[in-house]
Amino acid sequence: MVRCSSGPSPNVIPKEVEEVLDSLDGVLESAVVGRPDSDFGEVVVAVVVGEPGVTVDPEVLRLKARERLAGFKVPKQVLIVDELPRNALGKVEKARIRGDLAGLDADPNGLARMA
């Protein structure tokens, strides 16, 4: 099982965070991965697809997730995308997401918009 957040916090199971995010209003689906971090080793990052015609606010998603998850499980960064990358079998390509994240610079609030 893939686990992220290898820093001083307990392990985070991505599926648990994805289930919380996917249950929030306006969220069609999400993928959660770890992103390397110089202070913590790895931090939780969520990539979210909003429902058609709905504007999703990353900060609102983080606040709502905080109501249902332990603080160390709340994504430090939420990226809004049009669709998640998938392989030929339809499985989300988390390795590709991690690679895409390596090329992004986060804004000062830890939130960014992935094109």
Image: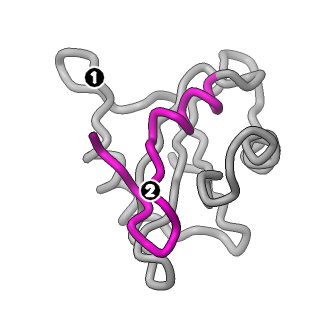
Using the rendered view, name the quadrant where residue 17 is placed: top right
Tell me where residue 69 appears, x and y as whole percent.
69, 44
- Kindly state the secondary structure of the residue where label 2 is placed: loop
**Outermost bottom residue:** 39
**Outermost left residue:** 88
Tell me where residue 15 appears, x and y as whole percent.
46, 33
Disc 1 to disc 2, C-alpha distance:
23 Å
Tell me where residue 40 appears, x and y as whole percent.
48, 77
Q: Which mark is residue 31?
A: none
Residue at 57% x, 35% y: name it: 48
* Mark 1 and mark 2 residues within 8 Å of each other at the beta carbon: no
Residue at 51% x, 56% y: name it: 44
Which quadrant: the N terminus?
top left
Q: Earlier in the sequence, mark 1 or mark 2?
A: 2
What's the amino acid at mark 2? Asn
Which residue was labeled with disc 1? 91
Q: Is residue 13 magenta?
A: yes
Residue at 29% x, 56% y: name it: 99
In depth, the one of 66 and 115 nearer the eye is 66
Using the rendered view, name the quadrant where residue 29 is placed: top right
In depth, the one of 86 and 17 nearer the eye is 17
Which residue was labeled with disc 2? 11
Q: Is residue 103 magenta?
A: no
Tell me which segment is drawn in magenta.
1-22
Left or right for 94, reference 51: left
**Outermost front residue:** 10
Image height of 25 relative to 3, above or below: above
> Crowdedness of circle 2 by 10 Å Cα count: few (<14), some, many (20+)?
some
> Crowdedness of circle 1 by 10 Å Cα count: few (<14), some, many (20+)?
few
